[in-house]
Each structure stands twice: as structure tokens, then as C-alpha cells.
Amino acid sequence: MKILSVYRWATVGGVERVILNRACAFKQHGLDVRQDVFFLHDSGGLPNFRRFVRKHELSDYVRIVDKIDQQDYDRIISFDTPEIFEDVKEHSKLIVECHSPYKESRTYLKSLPQEVACLVSPSEAFMQSVVQPEIVQGFEGRLYVLPNFHVMEFGEGEGAEPVRSKIWSKKPICYIGRMDAMKNTKELMEIFAKLRHEKNDEYFLMLVGDVRPHYMDISEALKKHHIEDRTAYLRNIPYDKVDVLLRQIREHEGIFVSPSQGESFGLSALEAMVNEVPVLLTGIDCHKALVGGDEQLLYKLGDTGGAADKIKNISQNYSRLSQTAAKLAARYSSAAFIEAWEKMINGIGH
């Protein structure tokens, strides 16, 4: 089966990681599925994408193309890229995947072509609470969930980079991902400031990812909260280095925190959980589903003091909650994705 996945931007982001993870799963499970990927714009992510493909020998399962020949593909997948609707003559070939928590990126759902094969989201929570209320009528029976997952075996094994026992004197509070108003990164700074100044100065803040233009000046924001001397900031890192970093965080009894106001799944949090890093997440629907509603791993959006208290509780029960996180993450396997994929493909017809 040959498919084309289309996405607006090539970044070091979640959709790109989803595409690569799927290639890993198709290879691991022996499925004859070839993905071509067409990006409308390169936002700096292509070298990292290609590097991952080379490192994990995925060239038979995924490749980047610079033009589209519709007749070459059995199915065409649009990841929140409605621009492709006008270019694809056979709408019945289209699988539309909605992954965006940003409302302005989902306006196309109100005018979705009725002929598309199906509509997909990465979680049942996002499908029910966000996608279904926004779509036009007539898609009953054509809604599917393709759950995200993390393929650990492609980052582990004999070639895995060793984790050094102690390189930091304090425990990391980590966030990995885009930083903007939706991701609510400023709230994490407030949480960390309370933790440092009112609770215990045994932590440092680690922020990994790009700051969206006009959201904040990160240096000024850190100075405002008097935490610039307890913060490490890294730009985007390659996909296969994320696990290395998370294992190092686990070694130092660190915690992953997401203050996000909206998610379609929570892939960065899942990556942390797979690596046995406990998480503290806002109590939005997708996060609740990800951690099975465990209140020890959730905090009320805006309750910075409560979040600081819960971080202390996680530290005090670190070993137990580390294993809890790993067990919860095990529900999101490549095998579960393959089962959902085959259900979708059989449902819409080859």
C-alpha cells in the first residue's frame, strides 16, 4: 500500500514525529505500507527528519517528495492541511487527520468535503470533546482514532547512548515542546518560581523547544520570576536525542510538567512516561486520558500553588510514580496503533 502524507510545515514537531513513528511501526510489524511525505514549507525540520530516516534505516517505509502525482497513491492523508483539498481531484482518496489543538487551524472542519474517506484524530478524548462538535453533518461511521505511541526499540539497544549517573546537582523540572500561549509555558515558570521560593530549592527548570514569536522574551520572563539562575534553555533537539535526555532526567529523579491549555494527545508527555519519568499535567481531557485520571499526576489549570505541592509529592514518591507512569504508557504501543490502522483501512476499503 502506498500513501502520501501532507503537512504544512516541516518542523521538529509532533506531526513529523507521528509520521516517523508510524514508519517504525510498519517496519517492525512487517506491514507493506510505504509513506511518501510532502511538506508545503520547510521550517527547518527537514534535515532532522532525514537524519532519523537514515539512522533507523526507514528509507523503504518513508521518504520526502517535492511534488505530488495523485495517481501514485492508494490513500492521501492530510494532517490539518486543507490546502490539499483543491489539488486532490479524487476526494474519496483523502484521509483527513485533525491533530491541532489550535482552533484557527481547525476551521476547515466546518466545510470538510463530504466525499473524503474518513476523519481521524489521535485520541478518543480529542475526537469527542473537540473534533465532533466542530465537523459538518454526515460523518457518522467515518470517524476513527489512530492513537499515538512511542517506539522505544528504535531508540534503545546496543547503540543507545549511555546515561551518566550524575551531571546535575539539582533535580530537573522539564518541559519539551513548542512554547506559546496554548502551551502556556509562562505558567510553568510561575509554578517553578513558587517551588523554588516557597517550597524547596532542590530543583532546576529545563525548557526545550522554540519560543513562538511575540509570546515572550524568555530571558526577561525568567528574570521577572527570579529563576534565571535555575533555568537551562535548549532549542529543539533531534528526535532520537529526546530519549537520551529523558533517561538522564530519570537518572536525576526529574519530572516532566505540561501546563498546556489544549492538546490532541500529549505525545511529549507520553515520551517522558515511556522513559519512566513521572509527569504532572493539566487536567484537560487528553491529559486525563493519558494518565488514566490519576490525580497525583494532574493539576488544575491555573493552580500554580497546587502544582508546586504535587511536584513535591511526586518527588517524595518518585520510584512508585515512575513505575506508574511507565505502566500507563505501555497502553500506547505500536501494536495498538497497527490494530487501529488496520481497522480504519478495512473500514474504508483499500
Image (cartoon, helix red, strand yellow):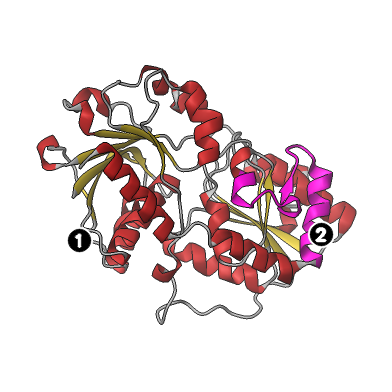
Q: Are marks 1 and 2 in contact (CB under 8 Å)?
A: no
Is residue 51 found left or right of 303 in the rendered image? left
Disc on res. 312: 2
Q: How far apart are marks 1 and 2 (CA)?
A: 47 Å
Magenta stretch: give its range: 287-316
Task: Answer left or right for 343 relative to 194.
Answer: left
Q: Mark 1 points at which residue?
A: 60
Please provide percent x and percent y for residue 159: 40, 79
Mark 2 element type: helix
Name the residue rendered at 59%, 71% in the picture: 248
- In the picture shown, does residue 80 fall above or below 275? above
252 lies above or below 233: below
Pick whichever of labels 1 and 2 is earlier in the sequence: 1
In-front residue for pair 28/43: 28
**Magenta span contains residue 155:** no
Amino acid under disc 2: Lys
